[in-house]
Amino acid sequence: MSLVLLKGVSKSFGDQRVLENVSLNISEGEFTVLVGPNGAGKSTLLRIMVGLLLPDEGEVNILGFDVKKHWKKLARYIGVVLANERSLYWKLTAWENLDIFGGIYNVPKKKRIERAEELLNFFGLYDDKDKLVEDYSTGMRKKLLLCKALIHQPKILFIDEILNGLDVNAVIQVNSFLEKSSKDGVTVVMVSHILHNLSEDAKIVLLKNGKIELISRYGDIFASKDVYNQLSELFLQSSEYAENE
């Protein structure tokens, strides 16, 4: 079953064409990673998927909703984490943040508590749940953003560059959680420069100059010389990034 369906999506900012005739189909439970060089249109595409930007041309259908018309209805069924997001309440604790956002999504109190405990425990934040968010490290805040996006158990999770700024162990931890979520039926769509430690079943979508150049299963990349050659520069950048963290 297709939960994300894009047909002929194009987007420009002024005279700059950022996306050109992009079509993409993402099925339920797939873990999809949008990759490509800076300026390829990855983040713009993700923002169009969640209704934060409107395409100039094309159709965007998420969970059966036409995003142009029904993005407000869609919001309750998706979780979103954007790059450099500052949506957390820094003067409140992690626990208070999750309680507030769970309430916004009308998650029952008992379920809210259970879900917050589950998420905080998985990401190693439970012992710091009563600490103010302003006292969290960058990595801890990013993990809390994931907890916030997942508090209402969304059907689709959209993530933009959440791995930036995390150490290698944290990257492995986050990818492990996303892989588990995918196997549990959550559809994951992630923009990332980090191509290591991904699930073999992850779907890699390569964008260049606003167009999809390649779609491949992560586990098949190394079996095909042509496919690997198209992604080799990104793997090199990913390795350099990991070494600098």
Image (cartoon, rainbow, N blue to C red):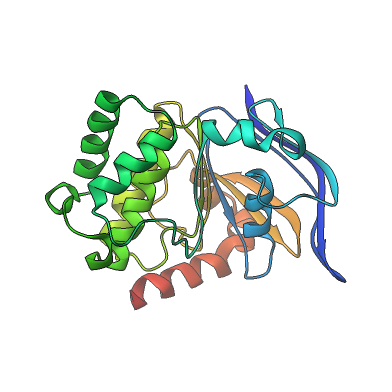
- Residue nearest the viewer, comparing 46 with 27: 46
x 22%, y 60%: residue: 132
x 82%, y 53%: residue: 10
Residue 23 image offset from top left, x and y in percent: 77, 42
- Residue nearest the viewer, comparing 62 with 69: 69
Question: Which quadrant of the view contains residue 20?
Answer: bottom right
x 64%, y 61%: residue: 230
Residue 26 image offset from top left, x and y in percent: 63, 35
Left or right of 202 in this view: 2: right
Residue 175 image offset from top left, x and y in percent: 37, 48
**How many labels sit on residues?**
0
> Which image quarter holds the C terminus?
bottom left
> Which image quarter holds the N terminus?
top right
- Residue nearest the viewer, comparing 65 with 159: 65
Residue 58 image offset from top left, x and y in percent: 84, 43
Q: Is residue 151 visible?
A: no
- Residue nearest the viewer, comparing 84 with 135: 135
x 28%, y 27%: residue: 109
* The furthest residue to the bottom: 244
* The furthest residue to the left: 127
Residue 236, compared with residue 100, is above or below; it is: below
Residue 50, compared with residue 234, is above or below; it is: above
